Image (cartoon, helix red, strand yellow):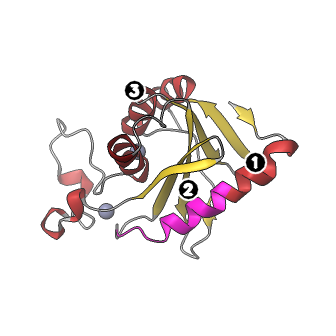
Amino acid sequence: MKYVTWEELETVNHFLNLTKEIAKQATCLRDKCGSIIVKDNKIIWSGFNSPPNNQENQRRCNCDKSTYHPKIKDTTCCIHAEQRAIMDALKNNPNKIIWSRLYFVRLNSYWNIKPSGKPYCTICSKMTLDSWVSEFVLLHLEWACIYDTDEYNTLSFSYNN
Ligand SMILES: [Zn+2]
Ligand SMILES: [Zn+2]
């Protein structure tokens, strides 16, 4: 993990703010998240969290996660913003995703960026790595940080608060 340098701060803040705008479109009732994938300072795709295929009959935002069987590992209700951005980028702009950078933002209740904690989503950490995204950007409380996706996956699986 590395902290964003002063030279890169303006660019990173620019993309984090755009990601915040994407997150505002999220239709999940539990959380509003956004993600954009950037290559050579151009956005190649973006995504926000919403039910699979946007089907209302598959909306699980109000389900009690503790009622699922232990075999069900992924109890998040909606498709994650990162998953959506990656899947759509692969569909629509497949040649650009290699060595790209993914930005992720979660909103607080005032629709501002909520600082991220340590990485823990092993679904998205595996997907970013597997689709050749090379960097994952999070805004932590202290500063914006860039992770290699290889490191991000290792950290996600070793999450312990
Ligand atoms: Zn949801
Ligand atoms: Zn995720």
Where is residue 91, by image quadrant?
top left
Q: Cα distance, mark 1 to mark 3?
A: 27 Å
Task: Reply above or below: 41 against 95.
Answer: below
Kind of residue at badge 1: Trp
Q: Earlier in the sequence, mark 1 or mark 3?
A: 3
Q: Which mark is residue 143?
A: 1
Q: Residue at x 24, y 52 (%)?
A: 66
Q: Of discs 1 and 3, which sits in the foreground?
A: 3
Of marks 3 and 2, which one's residue comes earlier in the chain?
Answer: 2
Q: Amino acid at mark 3?
A: Asp
| Front residue (pair 119, 47) | 47
Q: Residue at x 57, y 59 (%)?
A: 19
Which image quadrant: the N terminus? top right
Based on the picture, tell me whether residue 20 belongs to the magenta stretch: yes
Residue that badge 2 annotates = 105
> Upstream in the sequence, badge 2 or badge 1?
2
Observer-side mark, 3 or 2, equals: 3
Chief SS of the magenta region: helix
The residue that mark 3 highlights is 130
From which residue to which does the magenta span run?
15-27
Q: Could you tell me residue 127's position as x and y percent?
A: 38, 34
Answer whether residue 56 is magenta in the image. Answer: no
Residue 44 % position (x, y): 50, 48
Q: Residues within 10 Å of mark 1 (few under 14, many from 20)?
A: some
Residue 77: horizontal and vertical position, in percent? Answer: 27, 57
